[in-house]
Image (cartoon, rainbow, N blue to C red):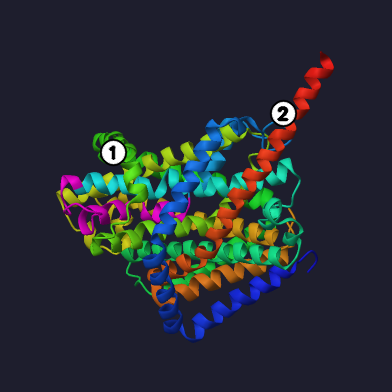
Amino acid sequence: MKNVTSVFWITLAIALFSVVWGSVAPKNLESITGSIQSYISVHFGWYYLLIVTGFVIFCLYMIFSPYGKMKLGKPADKPEYNYATWFAMLFSAGMGIGLVFWGAAEPIYFYANNAPTAETGTAAALNESMRFVYFHWGVHAWGIYAIVALVLAYFKFRRGSPALISPTLEPLFGDKMNGPWGKVVDVIAVFATIVGVATTLGFGAAQINGGLTFLTPLEDSFGIQLLIIAVVTVLFMISAYTGLSKGIRYLSNTNMVLALALLTITLIVGPTLFIMNMFTDTIGAYLQNLPTMSFRLAPNNEENRTWINNWTVFYWAWWIAWSPFVGIFIARVSKGRTIREFLSGVLLVPSVVGFLWFSTFGSSAIKVQQEQGGLSDLATEQVMFGTFDNYPLGLILSIIAMVLIGTFFITSADSATFVLGMQTTNGSLTPPTMVKFVWGIVQSSMAAVLLHSGGLQALQNALISAAFPFSFIMILMVVSLYKAIRADKIALDRGKDKEEKTSA
């Protein structure tokens, strides 16, 4: 296969080893990844909270600093897309299986089963449930994506570097990034991406199975989930074969239409006034409590600390693992924008859309729980379907939701095969089809193995373990960007001074 680098073969070997290990000794894989996950969560929970909040603070600093005027590209470059198209692409990048999987399940779980601090089932738990959902899916999540996207876009479009992680560290380490150390950095980024996407595919397979179980006599089993993964793998292979311009574009447009339809119909047939009241009230609570939530670790309360490890630390690891994948996509569509408008758009627009999404489905689920009960007893992957069952057009909503999960499944896997292909062919924008096929099969195999070895818990264990090493690379990327952008700003200012003196 032409253009394939050693990063491809090294990462493929590690991924295949993981797949074989999970197939031959699933309980052993679950046990070891569980131990790693537990150690990281207990001993480095503080680290995750500090760095993720640090990323958000850095983004805000860049927005309001003089560096905000600098472009992701040459000074004369103009944005390739208007605001409406660009915002739609950001929304599409952030919209995924996770939002459908957790849209109703996370708020209802926090409200009825395990509130962060309040007594479950109370008004305080209701308020807490929504603001912590916003916390997990809002500015902090997009701050992680924004950092990786900003660094990649700046080095790609301003400095002409390949669209890889390793070249972004050259201001710190120089030519060392062209040798073995650069390979190590890219291998870590590729493997984190594989595990991050595989986790999401696992969630998708589990939820499609959950929907079929809720609506039909089919059972909830690993065999059904394996069949779902196999069918979707064939579909996204076909999409990958047709190329980025056709396959992903058509699927992304389909996702947008289905997601908007699901959101709009639920907002209309659900408790509309309650949804909008909750949206307004809990946005205020989120903003008011954001600093406290950002640093909350509860060292003196074992129950609260366990909750933080299981939810906040898990989410921060998930977003970090997804950040190379989403970051490359966002970077590609943001050429020509200033750093200020780029970061403002990436942090705010998808966050607000996500808040409305969770308000709609979360409030609808909580209303059912308050009036009839029963939702909190359902499996996580069935809560969305249980909610729809209590409202008009419930069957139609459930069908739309399952189709949406399927198209998100295909889009995520299709896009990821392209990004992985690009990262393992020295940044090629047209990676060979065979390379994309290999990564597609590896992703699906890993999703199946993780589900087989321990279900959703194994997915979470693997995710936290894989994201940990990439988090250190992200810190180095921030330092490297600041060093590069500071040097470029000084050179730019000197150039302007010379022009002014010449013209005078």
Residue 403, position as x, y percentages in the image: 46, 55
Q: Disc number at residue 81?
A: none
Indicate the quadrant where residue 357 lies. top left
Residue 49 highlighted magenta (yes or no): no
Front-most of 417 and 256? 417
Disc tally is 2
Could you tell me the amino acid type at mark 2? Asp
Task: Answer left or right for 190 relative to 316.
Answer: right
Tag 1 residue: 285
**Would residue 345 be seen by someone viewing this image from the given angle?**
no
Label 1 Cα crowd, 10 Å radius (few <14 / some 14-19 / many 20+): some
Tell me: residue 18, above or below residue 277: below
Task: Answer left or right for 360 relative to 89.
Answer: left
Q: Which residues are magenta?
A: 96-124
Tell me: residue 481, above or below residue 437: above
How far apart in space, not on screen, are marks 1 and 2 (Cα)?
A: 43 Å
Tag 2 residue: 493
Front-most of 474 and 386? 474
Residue 120 highlighted magenta (yes or no): yes
Which residue is painted at 58% across and 80% down in the image? Answer: 17
**Would residue 81 be seen by someone viewing this image from the given angle?**
yes
Q: Quadrant of the C terminus?
A: top right
Residue 96, position as x, y percentages in the image: 48, 52
Indicate the quadrant where residue 138 lies. top left
Indicate the quadrant where residue 360 lies. top left
Could you tell me the amino acid type at mark 1? Ala
